[in-house]
Structure formats: C-alpha cells, structure tokens
C-alpha cells in the first residue's frame, strides 16, 4: 500500500517536471476578452457627461482631457492584447467571437472608437491639433468600421437559437455601433460649416443609421420586457444589463434633437422639401426626443430599484457593473438639452448631480476592477487552458486520469467533479 502511494507521488512529480510552464503574461493574453472595452467606454462616458455641464471652467476641461487620454490608452491596450491573442492563440480568439454571450461584446470596440472621436472633436479641434477634414475622414472610417464589425457578428449570433428566458438588453450591443452613428454625426457637424456640401451627407447618413439602429434595438427592448414578465427582474450578473435598456431611447433622443438643430441650418441652404423644413424637423424632433427621454428615464428607474437586491456582490463579475456608466450618457445629456430648450433650471441641477454621480461611479468601478485584476479574478486563464491552445496534443484531464462525461446538449466532453469560476454574462 505504501509502495503504491509512493509510486503515485513519484508519477505526479515526473509529470510536473515534464509539464510545460506557462508565464503570467501568457495567461493574461489568453484570458483577455472583448468585455474589457466597457472600461474604456465608461471612461469616455465621464468626459462626455462632464463636457455638457452648463458652468464649464478651464480646470474642468483639463480633467476631461485626462479622461480622454486614459480612454485612448485603454483602447490601445485592449486592441493590442486581443490582436496578440488572435496571433498566439487563434483558437481562443475564435472561441470568444463564436460564444453566444461573450461574442455580443465584440462591437464594443467600435463604440469605444466613437467615444474617442467625440473626445477628439471636444479637445483636439479647439487646440488646433486636428483639422475638420480629419474629423470628416474619421466619420467615414467609423461607418465602415461599424458595418464590417456588426454584420458578421449579427450573422454569427443569429445563426444559432437563443433562449428568451435568458435574454438581456446587452444582446443589443450587436446593433449599438450603428445606432450611435447619429450621435457621432451631430458631433462631426459641429466642426463642418452648414454651407459645406459634405454637411448634407453627414446629416442624412446620421438619420439613416440612427433610425436603423434605434428600431432594431427597440425590438430588443420589447423582448426584454417580455423576458421580465416571464422570469421577473434580472438577477445576479444580468442585473447590470438592465441599464443597457436606457441606451437606445436616451441616445436616440439626444441624436434626433441635435441633428434637427443642424438641419435648421443645412436644409434651407439647399432649399430641399420646403422653406420651413428645418424648423419643422426641429419641432418634431423635440417632441419625439421628449417622448424617448421619458422612456429612457423609466428604464433607468426600472433597473435601479431592484438592482442592489438582485446583484451578486462578487469581484469576478465586476466587468458587468460598467454597464452603470455608458448606457446612461444619452438620457443624462438629453437632460441638459431639455433644460436649454425649455429654460428649466431644475434640469441643470439634475444634470450636474448625475455628472458627479458618474465620476464617483467610475472611480469606484475602476478601483474594484484593478483589485479584481490584481487578484486574477478577471482576464486570466488557467494554465491548462493555455496549454490546450498552445499544444494541440495536450490534454490535462487525460494526464490526470480524470473521467470524462459527455454533455449531450452541448455535444462536448467535460471532466467529472470539475470546478470553474463563474464568469460575467451580460
């Protein structure tokens, strides 16, 4: 008996000696995912919200510029790391894209790029570091980027059936980049003269994609309401996804009003439709924006009330909490806009309060995300998972002699009595 036990120890020691080693950097690259981009988008949400404050000082602009550079650094970090993952571990990269849950985060690279474009307009144009012609080129780059990212992911995602009882508004991320074209458009129009022939193209393209994006995401919101009726409020990690529902109506309200404001100047130049077309569009857009603004605020409250009681307080699910930031930017910015249109001082106070809350939310989430990263709870794969994608012949379970059972529903083999850390689902 003792000899058998000793031989087993020697056998384990021999396997450990011959087992390839995996560096900490390799585990990080392999474990990186598209869920990292909400961090940058949340950072962009801070300076986009602060930029709309009525009382704006030079010191505040400096703070916003700091967030702008942090956002760009995070964008480069995430993009380079995922590129390295695709080169070094192509099977893991393809696995993430095909995943029915994690795959919906792929288009967030486009949304993160949109926040950088808006920041460039806010901080690089006034200083003269960037020209309006460059911004116009970035606009079309964004359009192409959104199309080549969204449509393949839509095809991949819709190629498989999905259970409505597990539906979450975060699935609308597949459409979000196209919905945000309207927001990018009115920001680009701020640096292009109304008499410039390019302005009309930016305006019409902004309306085209804003309509496409909003109505598609609106269908998702309908499914979300049906899901809540079937199963009750979203629970656990999915409770974060409830705030994504604020995005489509909030950003669409913001885009419609701002695009119509530019239409008042652009359309009369060309004499299209009628002499008063610009004013008619603007009046109709304010009405539509007000209706959508109410819907966005409702979804915010609808997700906020049960949030603390439904959320699982685990650091390994911290990435999902970034949904508290960027989806709310649309209705918060619209609050300031409504204050300007109707001259309501109380809305300025609400906007300032939400801007301050946004900063504190970002600070809390950023600190918790760093702690989770440091402890290896996020963006870190197990050694055996890295080895499987590095050495095709490597099988950790066969090496250990662990029995395998077949999951008939998924058609894959899994080890018995295996443990895995829960991951963030939208």
Image: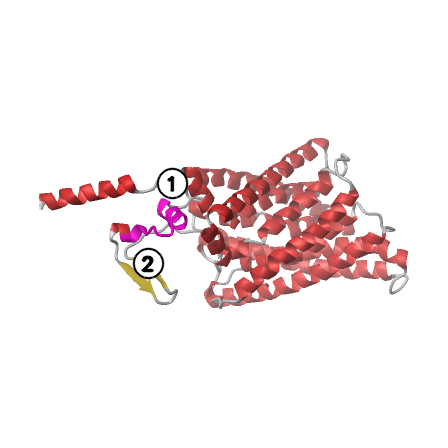
Q: Earlier in the sequence, mark 2 or mark 1?
A: 1
Rendered position, 244 above or below 30? below
**Which numbered dot is residue 189?**
none
Q: Position of residue 231 (x, y in %)?
A: 46, 65
Question: Which residue sits at x=89%, y=64%?
Answer: 274
Which residue is identified by label 2?
Answer: 414
User: What kind of secondary structure does the magenta stretch mostly adopt?
Assistant: helix
Question: Which residue sits at x=60%, y=52%?
Answer: 327
Q: Position of residue 307 (x, y in %)?
A: 49, 53
The residue lying furthest to the left in this view is: 1
88 with respect to 38 (left or right)? left
Which residue is identified by label 1?
Answer: 22
Question: Which residue sits at x=70%, y=41%?
Answer: 120
52 with respect to 112 (left or right)? right
Question: Which residue sits at x=81%, y=47%?
Answer: 192
Rendered position, 142 above or below 271? above
């Amino acid at each position: 008996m003792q000899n058998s036990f000793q031989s087993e120890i020697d056998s384990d020691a021999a396997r450990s000696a011959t087992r390839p080693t995996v560096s900490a950097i390799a585990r990080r690259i392999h474990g990186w995912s598209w869920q990292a981009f909400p961090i940058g988008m949340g950072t962009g949400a801070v300076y986009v919200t602060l930029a709309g404050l009525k009382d704006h000082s030079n010191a505040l602009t400096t703070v916003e510029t700091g967030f702008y550079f942090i956002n760009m650094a995070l964008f480069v970090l995430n993009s380079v790391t995922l590129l390295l993952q695709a080169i070094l571990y192509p099977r893991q990269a393809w696995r993430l894209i095909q995943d029915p849950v994690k795959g919906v985060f792929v288009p967030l690279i486009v949304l993160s790029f949109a926040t950088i474009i808006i920041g460039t307009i806010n901080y690089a144009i006034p200083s003269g570091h960037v020209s309006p012609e460059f911004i116009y080129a970035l606009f079309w780059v964004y359009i192409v980027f959104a199309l080549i990212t969204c449509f393949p992911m839509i095809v991949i995602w819709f190629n498989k059936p999905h259970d409505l009882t597990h539906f979450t508004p975060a699935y609308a991320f597949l459409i979000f980049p196209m919905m945000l074209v309207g927001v990018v458009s009115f920001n680009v129009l701020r640096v292009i003269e109304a008499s410039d022939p390019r302005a009309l193209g930016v305006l019409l393209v902004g309306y085209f994609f804003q309509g496409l994006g909003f109505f598609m995401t609106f269908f998702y919101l309908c499914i979300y309401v049906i899901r809540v009726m079937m199963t009750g409020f979203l629970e656990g990690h999915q409770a974060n996804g409830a705030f994504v529902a604020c995005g489509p109506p909030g950003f669409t309200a913001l885009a419609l009003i701002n695009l119509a404001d530019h239409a008042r100047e652009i359309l009369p130049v060309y004499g299209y439709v009628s002499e008063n077309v610009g004013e008619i569009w603007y009046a109709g857009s304010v009405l539509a924006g007000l209706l959508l603004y109410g819907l966005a605020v409702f979804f915010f409250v609808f997700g906020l009330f049960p949030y603390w009681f439904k959320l699982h307080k685990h650091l390994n699910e911290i990435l999902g909490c970034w949904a508290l930031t960027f989806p709310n930017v649309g209705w918060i910015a619209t609050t300031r806009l409504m204050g300007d249109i109707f001259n309501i001082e109380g809305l300025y106070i609400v906007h300032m309060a939400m801007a301050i809350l946004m900063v504190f939310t970002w600070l809390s989430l950023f600190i918790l995300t760093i702690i989770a990263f440091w402890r290896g709870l996020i963006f870190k794969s197990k050694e055996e998972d890295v080895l499987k994608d590095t050495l095709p012949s490597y099988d950790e379970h066969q090496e250990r002699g662990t029995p395998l059972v077949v999951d008939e529903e998924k058609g894959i083999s899994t080890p018995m009595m295996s443990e895995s850390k829960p991951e963030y689902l939208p």
